[in-house]
Image (cartoon, helix red, strand yellow):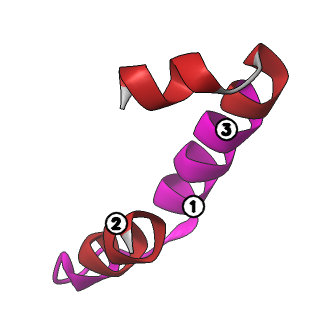
Amino acid sequence: TRPFLGLVSRAKAAKLVRTLVDLFLDMEAGTGEEVNQIFFYFYF
């Protein structure tokens, strides 16, 4: 993750991290599948 964040500007990296944190905090992680869906979305 850090090498990727080094390739983009600080503002874009901060926005990406903030978006990921917001998504993580807003979800209802009952089974953990929600976390897998978010990571799948961002990695593929």
For residue 38, what is the image quadrant? bottom left
User: Callout 1: 10 Å neighbours few (<14), some, many (20+)?
Assistant: some
Residue at 76% across / 37% down in the picture?
15
Tell me the distance, in whole angstroms, between the alpha carbons under discs 2 and 1.
11 Å
- What secondary structure is found at the residue carrying circle 3? helix
Q: Amino acid at mark 3?
A: Arg
Which label was assigned to residue 23?
Answer: 1
Tell me the distance, in whole angstroms, between the alpha carbons under discs 3 and 1.
9 Å
Residue at 24% across / 81% down in the picture?
30
Q: Position of residue 20 (x, y in %)?
A: 55, 50
Choose the circle earlier in sequence order: 2 or 1: 1
Q: Amino acid at mark 1?
A: Leu
The stretch of residues the image draws in magenta is 14-34
Q: Is residue 23 magenta?
A: yes
For residue 23, what is the image quadrant? bottom right
Q: Position of residue 42 (x, y in %)?
A: 46, 65
Q: Which-is-in-front pick, marks 2 and 3?
A: 2
The residue singled out by tag 3 in the image is 18
User: Callout 2: 10 Å neighbours few (<14), some, many (20+)?
Assistant: few
Quarter of the image where the N terminus is located: top left
